[in-house]
Image (tube, rainbow, N blue to C red):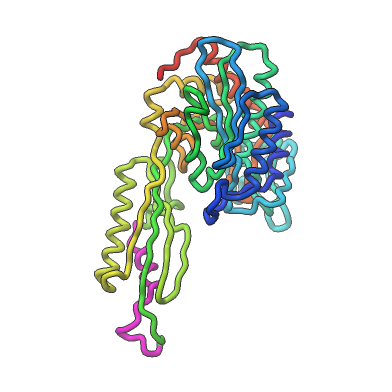
Amino acid sequence: MNATERFLKYVTYSTASSEKSETRPSTPGQRTLTGALADEMREMGLSDVYITEEDGAVYGTVPATAENAPAIGFLAHVDTSSSASGENVRPRIVRDYDGGEIVLCEGVSMSPDKNFPDLAALAGEDLIVTDGKTLLGADDKAGVAEIMAAAEMLLASDKPHGKVKIGFTTDEEIGKGPDLIDVGRFGCDFAYTVDGGRIGEIEYENFNAASAFAEFTGVGVHPGSAKDVMKNACSMAMEFCALLPAQQKPEYTSGYEGFIHLDEMSGDVTSAKLSFIVRDHDLGKLREKEDIMRAAADFICRKYGEGSASVRIEETYYNMREKIEPHPELIEAAKSAFEKAGAVPEIIPIRGGTDGSKLSFMGLPCPNLSTGGYHFHGIYECIPVSALETMPQVILNIVDHFARGNRYEK
């Protein structure tokens, strides 16, 4: 199967991860898909195929046919975001896209003029889109399909190559993807995640990340006799948000600008809760944002009384740049691989996280590569067929680059 055929098959598996689950993987569909992938790997001829009991991730090996070449890993994740439904995904291909409006279903459409200007550059492409009711799952089943297609092509190739390790993790979307990876058992010198956006992207900088949880405790009485007695927790929560820098909301930021994002809220007069995600490429600036949130909680307490507000902050992952910069050959190899495949490489910062971040801090340098997808985590998600078919060649070009004796220094 080529990458497109694989992708259209894999998106039919329902694999949305869940932050509310206490199991690993967080949803059973993920283990169903990794089980199917394990069967495909064995049928293709990969060796040392195994599924980890702890988290349901699946791994396999393309044995080396050349000596002295480094062992290279390629990883993607099988789970999808819960931001939109991943049940009963029904993809379709828009052939030779004319650059205009694409009607996904009644009342749901996308176009360069109305809502997605980046579609203009995709005119003439065959685009895989949703039916307007679910996400597509290109994040990251496109990466899974591209790696699997590359592995099949490599097994059929007579070109000498080093050992290639492939792995498909679970629960990446809820920040747990690489937590249980045994880097020693995975057994490679460095790796690449295939989990990015438009074709040609190379990423080795990601956000430093924290989660923040603010809680507010009020005093509830009948509103008819509330004067000088009621302390409304919902009002405190709104006031807390107003104390945060408005320009640091994600809808006003781009590039290297970090943000404080209100993600969830709940409450009543006596108790209210807010959940935030806090991000910045600069760790110092991330911690400045954390301090702003603590100061806002202190202000609420001074105004409404001790214990009226509290904020708990948990740092979750860090910018992998410091772990990748000592290995510039990994980025140069990726740039050359894209160029040889006819794609223009572009180094950009990730405005999010990636399994590669945690893996890099676990001792496995792991920059990120594009999949070719657009508009992830929603019903407008799409991916060009050409990107799905280009990425396997990019992967093979990276393998060939190091098999031909190009250096890698541990």
- Asked whether residue 289 is drawn in magenta, I would say no
Q: Nearer the viewer, residue 135 or 185?
A: 185
Quadrant housing the N terminus:
top right
Q: What range of the chain is rendered magenta?
A: 224-245
User: Residue sitting at 30 percent across and 62 percent down?
Assistant: 296
Percent coordinates x, y for residue 4 in the rendering: 71, 33
**Which residue in the rendered view is the most extreme toward the front?**
53
Determine the image quadrant of residue 215: bottom left
Image vertical order of residue 383 relative to residue 106, above or below? above
Determine the image quadrant of residue 156: top right
- Asked whether residue 232 is drawn in magenta, I would say yes
Side of 385 where 191 appears, left or right: left
Percent coordinates x, y for residue 65 in the rendering: 60, 12
Q: Is residue 103 visible?
A: no
Percent coordinates x, y for residue 316 in the rendering: 41, 46
Q: Nearer the viewer, residue 364 or 144?
A: 364
Side of 301 where 144 appears, left or right: right
Quadrant housing the C terminus:
top left
Image vertical order of residue 50 relative to residue 286, above or below? above
In this figure, what is the number of numbered marks?
0
Percent coordinates x, y for residue 212 in the rendering: 39, 55
**Which residue in the rendered view is the most extreme toward the bottom?**
224
Image vertical order of residue 269 relative to residue 41, above or below? below
Q: Is residue 343 visible?
A: yes
User: Residue sitting at 59 percent across and 31 percent down?
Assistant: 59
User: Residue sitting at 64 percent across and 27 percent down?
Assistant: 390
**Which residue in the rendered view is the most extreme toward the left?**
302
